[in-house]
Amino acid sequence: MKKFILITFILLFSFSTQAQDKKAKALLDQVTARVRSYDNIVIDFKYSLNNSKENINQDSKGNVTMKNNQYVLNFMGITKIFDGRKTYTIVPEDEEITISSFNEKDDSAITPSKMLTFFNSGYKYSMDILQDVRGRKIQYIKLIPTNARDQRKEILLGIDVQTKHIYNLIEMGKKGTKTTLTVNSFKTNQPLSKNQFIFAESKYPNYYINKLD
């Protein structure tokens, strides 16, 4: 009898988990579809890094403008421009610019546009808690990397239930590091300059330009 009860419990738990996974998959698919429906996206964000063991607490702000796979990212005093072929990393403090080609076959290459749909492969996922954040319903999905060598223990992805936009992303490292990216502003289909994603070398006359390829 005890064995029967145990087997029943295991089956019920399995069905419940599968149902949660389907709900999580459906919500992630909605997020992906919403992101891909926009002509462009402009995001202001806050980035926090914490590790209590190492006594590290860092906060930074940034912004990124994206259209298809092109982007302009401003973060920690550095600007990155990707025009679809090359990445231009501009460091005003050092008056240096690094130019490198983008390898489409390199799956490990992370771009801002991928950050909004990164969860589509390489993770197990399940529904987590639902929180009320200043009147917004934020549904969290727990992501577990399937690659054992991944240094991240788990990721919590917060999704606005109404808009299907990503509200925040919390990464827990295996060594106790916690990083949080919170979206402060999410604008779509903004009027952009035709030169938005074009690097103009003439704007940096005294910079050292380092061409990697």
Image: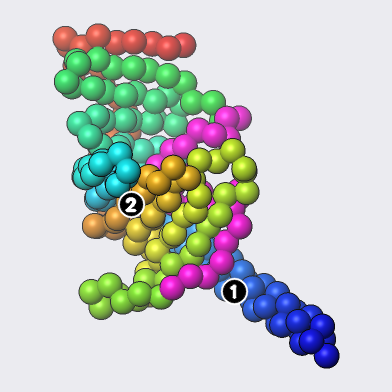
- Residue 191 lies, in percent from the top left, at 25, 49
Residue placed most toward the observer, 13 or 119: 13
For the rendered model, the colour scheme is rainbow
Task: Examine the structure image and report whether residue 110 is included in the region drawn in magenta.
Answer: yes
- Mark 2 vs mark 1: which is more N-terminal? 1
Q: Residue furthest bottom?
A: 1
Magenta segment: 105-129
Task: Give x and y (percent) for residue 150.
Answer: 55, 41
| Amino acid on which disc 2 is placed | Thr
* Camera sees residue 179: yes
Q: Which residue is label 2 attached to?
A: 180
Which residue lies at the image location 48% right of the left edge and 70% below the top edge?
Answer: 128
Name the residue rendered at 39%, 25% in the picture.
Answer: 87
Residue 6, by quadrant, is bottom right
* Residue pointed to by mark 1: 20
* Quadrant containing the N terminus in the rendered view: bottom right
Vertical position of residue 51 compared to residue 188: above or below: above
Disc 2: CA contacts within 10 A as few (<14), some (14-19) or many (>=20)? some
**Total labels drawn:** 2
The single residue placed furthest to the front in the displayed view is 2
